[in-house]
Image: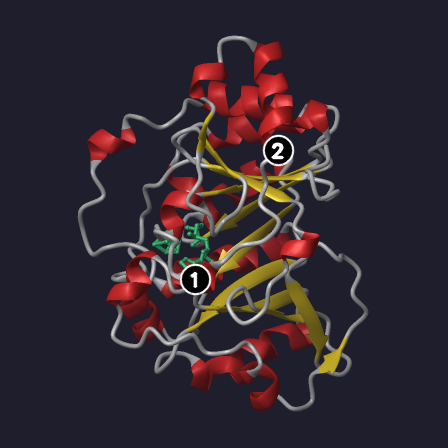
Amino acid sequence: MQDSFGREINYLRISITDLCNLRCQYCMPASGICKSEHENILSFEDFYTITKAFSELGVNKVRITGGEPLVKRDIIDFIKNINKLENIDEITMTTNGILLEEYAEDLKNAGLDRVNISLDTLDPKKYSEITRGGDLDKVLKGIKKMEELNLTPIKINAVLIDGFNIDEIRDLVELTRFRKIDVRFIELMPIGEVLNLKDKNTISGDIVLEKVKELEPTKRDDPSSPAIYYKLPGAKGKVGIIKPVTCKFCKDCNRIRLTSKGFLKLCLHSNEEIDLKPHLDNYEELKEFLIKTILKKPEEHHLEDGDFVSKSMSTIGG
Ligand code: SAM
Ligand code: SF4
C-alpha cells in the first residue's frame, strides 16, 4: 500500500486502550482519565477487522500499544487471532512492563515476537516518582522473564528528561554490554502533559554521544526505523537514539496509527484523525476507504509550527 509520496505503508500501531496502570508525569495527568470515555473504545472484534483489512492491503507489521496494553483482558486472544493473519510477519508490543512477568509466557505462545519496555530510570525511588507509584522491581522481573523466554532483543525505551535521568545515561547504556538488550533514548516531545512539566525542555538525543564517548556507529539495517544505532565495543546489544524533535524522519515513515476509539492517525504530529467506525459494517467498503484514506498521509509533520493541538501519547499510542 503506497501513499501519495510513494512511501510503502506496512506498519500499523494499534492503541488498544487509553487506560494505564501508571501515571507517568510526562504522559498522563495525576488523575482524571474518565471511565465513561473508556466506553467508546473499540472492541477487539473491531480492532481485528481493521487489522485484517490493512493486512490484505500490505501491512505486515503490527505493534500493540496504549495506554498500557497489558491492562486489557483478552489481549492474548487478540494476538493469537492477528498472528493467524496470513500477511502479518511481526507482532510487537510497547509496554511499561509492570505486568510483563505475569503475561510473558502467554504472550510468547500467542505469537508475540518482541517487546519494547519503557524504562526511564534504574533507581527505584526515581521510577516511583516519574511513574507516580510504579514498582521498578516488577519491570526488572518482566525483563528477566523475556530474556529467559528468548523474546529478544528486548528494546528498552528511555525518554531523556531534563533534570531527571541525564545522569543515568551511562548506566542505561551499560545494560547493552552483556545482554541482548537494545536501549533507545528518545527525545521528550513537547506534547500533552509535557506542557505542564517544570522541566519541559527537550534535551537533544546527541547528549548520549557526549556522555558515552566510546559508542560506535553501526550499519543502518532498517531505513524506516527512527532510531540511529550505536554500540559499545564488543557489546551484545545496541544503543539507539531517536530524535523526533530535533530531526525529522518523515521521508522514510512507513507507519499509521489506530487509536483506541477507532480513529486513524496518518501522522503522529497531525491534528487529523479519521473515524473508521462508520465503515466497520461493510468489509469491502472499509478496504476501499482505507486505500483512499492512505493517500492523505501528509508529506511531513510541522511539530515546530505550534498549530498542532497536542494530545498525550497515552491517547495516541506511543
Ligand atoms: N504504556 C506503554 C509504555 O509506557 O510503554 C505504552 C504506551 S506509552 C504512551 C509509549 C511510549 O511513549 C513510552 O515509551 C513513553 O515513554 C513514550 N512517551 C509518552 N509521552 C512522551 C513524550 N511526550 N515524548 C516522548 N515519548 C513519550
Ligand atoms: Fe502509562 Fe505508558 Fe503513559 Fe506511562 S508512558 S502513563 S506507562 S501510557
Q: Ligand 1 near label 2 (Cβ, under 8 Å)? A: no
Image height of 278 relative to 274, above or below: above
Name the image quarter holding residue 68. top left
Marks 1 and 2, the one that precedes in the sequence: 2
Q: Nearer the viewer, residue 293 or 77?
A: 293
Label 2 packing within 10 angstroms: few (<14), some (14-19), many (20+): some
Image coordinates of residue 70 in percent, x first then y, are 43, 41
Q: Nearer the viewer, residue 190 or 167?
A: 190
Ligand 1 image position (quadrant): bottom left
Q: Residue at x 50, y 25 (%)?
A: 47
Tags 1 and 2 touching, CB below 8 Å: no
Disc 2 target residue:
294
Question: Looking at numbered disc 2 in the image, what kind of residue is underneath it?
Answer: Ile
Disc 1 target residue:
305
Image height of 192 relative to 277, above or below: below
Could you tell me which quadrant the N terminus lies in?
A: top right
Q: Residue at x 71, y 54 (%)?
A: 224
Q: Tell me: 264 left or right of 123.
A: right
Image coordinates of residue 147 in percent, x first then y, are 62, 57
Question: Looking at numbered disc 1 in the image, what kind of residue is underneath it?
Answer: Asp
Colour scheme of the picture: secondary structure
Name the image quarter holding residue 136. bottom left
Label 1 packing within 10 angstroms: few (<14), some (14-19), many (20+): few
Q: Residue at x 78, y 65 (%)?
A: 220
Instruction: Please tell me whether mark 1 or mark 2 is closer to you in this view.
Output: 1
Image height of 173 relative to 179, above or below: below
Name the image quarter holding residue 180. bottom right
